Amino acid sequence: MKAKLIIIFTVVVCIGIILTGYLFHSIYGRANIDKGSLTVPAAPIISTTSVQQITYLVSPEDPTKYCNGEDMDSIGYQKTITHQESTSTPLANPSKLEIIKTVLNAATTGMCHDALNQADIREDNGVVYIPPFDGWAGISITMCSCQPQVEVNLLQIPDITKVVWSADNGVSSLPSKDNIISLETPLPGQTISSPLTIKGQARGSWFFEASFPVILVDWDGQIIAQGSARAKGDWLTTEFVPFEANLNFVIDKKIYSNKGSLILKKDNPSGISGKADSLEIPVVFSVDKE
């Protein structure tokens, strides 16, 4: 009897163990299956595109406070271009020219910005060449603030050492007038000082009463000296006649740019625009800085 009880007890225990194992598997095993079937949100997709940050400087001041026709204080405005901002380019490895254009697009304003967006800007060996803007009413006022905006920012770009406001890699594309008038001195791009002696030759048709106007202007187009070139021979001819002129001028030591132009105008007493003509060459003023 006692042996039977032991056997029955053993069988009950075994059945209990089996049932317990079954229930454990049913509950926890099912839970694991459900968890495995859950939809887990995917990790965020991060763009691998490299974005290069580019810093530039702006002025908190209104440009017209310094450049308005009456006041043309480029140097004063330049000193206010100190506030740093940043922009970006989606290009992984932008070229130097692409960086230059990105900076100009961000750092310039108004007509300056619009003109530069249409300009054929080039860079060669650390020098940025910006072609002259076509003339429009107010260009002098625009350039008063445009030039500081451009030069302050471009000269901060690594390896950029100079900004030249001229076409064709620093040599202005001027129409040839050698068959009408030519200069012996000064030559295009020459550094000049006062008094300036101007010598050359022109055909007799360039003169009237043995003379023609000569004008010297600064980078902003402001006249700093003017006079007349005189024929050194008989001007009543179709041949070349030597001429000479002398100009005295004073350059402000604080002038923003020492670039200018010498203009030799055909004397046109008739006032008919179709008969007007001129020769303009770039010059550089010798300026003694204080």
Image (tube, rainbow, N blue to C red):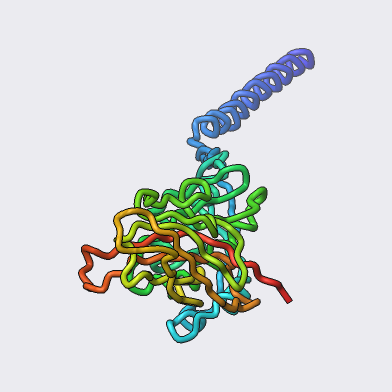
Q: Residue at x 44, y 59 (%)?
A: 242
Question: Which residue is depicted at the point 36% across and 63% down?
Answer: 234
Where residue 207 appears, x then y in whole percent? 33, 66
Identify which residue, 24 or 244, lies in the foreground.
244
How far across and down, in percent of the image, does residue 84 sit? 61, 66
| Viewer-side residue, 156 vs 70 | 70
Q: Give the answer, above or below, for where 2 lies relative to 242.
A: above
Q: Quadrant of the N terminus?
A: top right
Quadrant of the image occupied by residue 112: bottom left
Q: Residue lying furthest bottom in this view?
A: 70
In the image, is 65 to the left or to the right of 19? left
Residue drawn 50% across and 31% down?
Answer: 37
Relative to residue 69, is residue 236 depicted above or below?
above
Q: Is the residue 141 above or below the residue 47 in the image?
A: below
Residue at image x 62%, y 69%? 193
The picture places residue 39, in percent across and down from the top left corner, at 48, 36
Residue lying farthest right?
Answer: 2
Q: How many marks?
A: 0
Residue farthest to the front, as pictured: 234
- The residue closer to the viewer here, 111 or 45, is 111
137 left or right, relative to 188: left
Percent x, y for residue 263?
43, 66
Work out which quarter of the rendered image holds the C terminus and state it: bottom right
